[in-house]
Amino acid sequence: MASEEARASAHELDAGRAEVGLTALLEACERAVEEVGAAVPPAQLRALLVIDREGSLNLNRLAGLLGASASAASRLCDRMHAAGLVTRERAAANRREILLLPTESGRRLADWVRGRRRAALADLLLGMSLDGAEALARGLEELAADEAVTGLASAMAAVGESWRSQLHAGG
């Protein structure tokens, strides 16, 4: 029992220390692309990066990857389409299915954002020891590959959607 409590305490300490580093990483990435913030809201930018990474996907898949409802993702895509960031095309295999694809300007923006984020990350890594930088890179790769993390992000987004809808409903 005592060893379980010690492990739980150590895990909380590690999570607390990691959160401080994560905050620095997120702030650096946000600062790197803040100049685009007025033109393209963060939700649209996040969706564009997902669409660009996937190449093409349907609305339900996008909603799942964003952890959003299909109706929220549809409204988001309407705004992105109006801004010239994505196009909608009928799928060859199923003419009822609509695929979302980045436009040329959407691809350029996604590439620019990724480049700015990589540069910000490179600057942060320069301030770290080689062992620390390699450990961070390995840890981030593990996070990206972990389906439980992806599921957790979707669940957290769904909780956020639920909370926002309750807030707007007055309850």
Image (cartoon, rainbow, N blue to C red):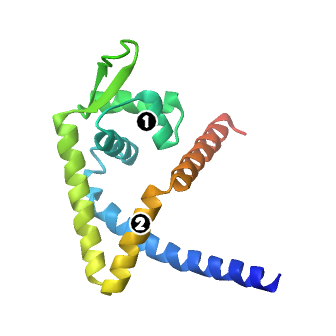
87 w.r.t. 160: above or below: above
Q: Residues within 10 Å of mark 2 (few under 14, many from 20)?
A: few
Amino acid identity at mark 2:
Leu
Q: Is residue 63 rendered to the left or right of residue 158?
A: left
Residue 104: x and y, percent?
Answer: 16, 36
Please tell me in which quadrant of the rendered image residue 77 appears.
Answer: top left
Q: Is residue 7 rendered to the left or right of residue 18?
A: right
Residue 160: x and y, percent?
Answer: 59, 46
Which residue is identified by label 1?
62
In the image shown, does 145 or 118 lie closer to the viewer? 145
Amino acid identity at mark 1:
Leu
Residue 138 disc label: none
Which residue is identified by label 2?
140
In the image shown, does 31 or 15 lie closer to the viewer? 15
How far apart are the two marked residues, 2 and 1, measured between alpha carbons? 22 Å
Discs 2, 1 touching: Cβ within 8 Å:
no
Label 1 element class: helix
Q: Which residue is depicted at the point 67% across and 39% down?
A: 166
Q: Which residue is depicted at the point 28% across and 31% down?
A: 101
Residue 157: x and y, percent?
Answer: 55, 46
Residue 62: x and y, percent?
Answer: 43, 35
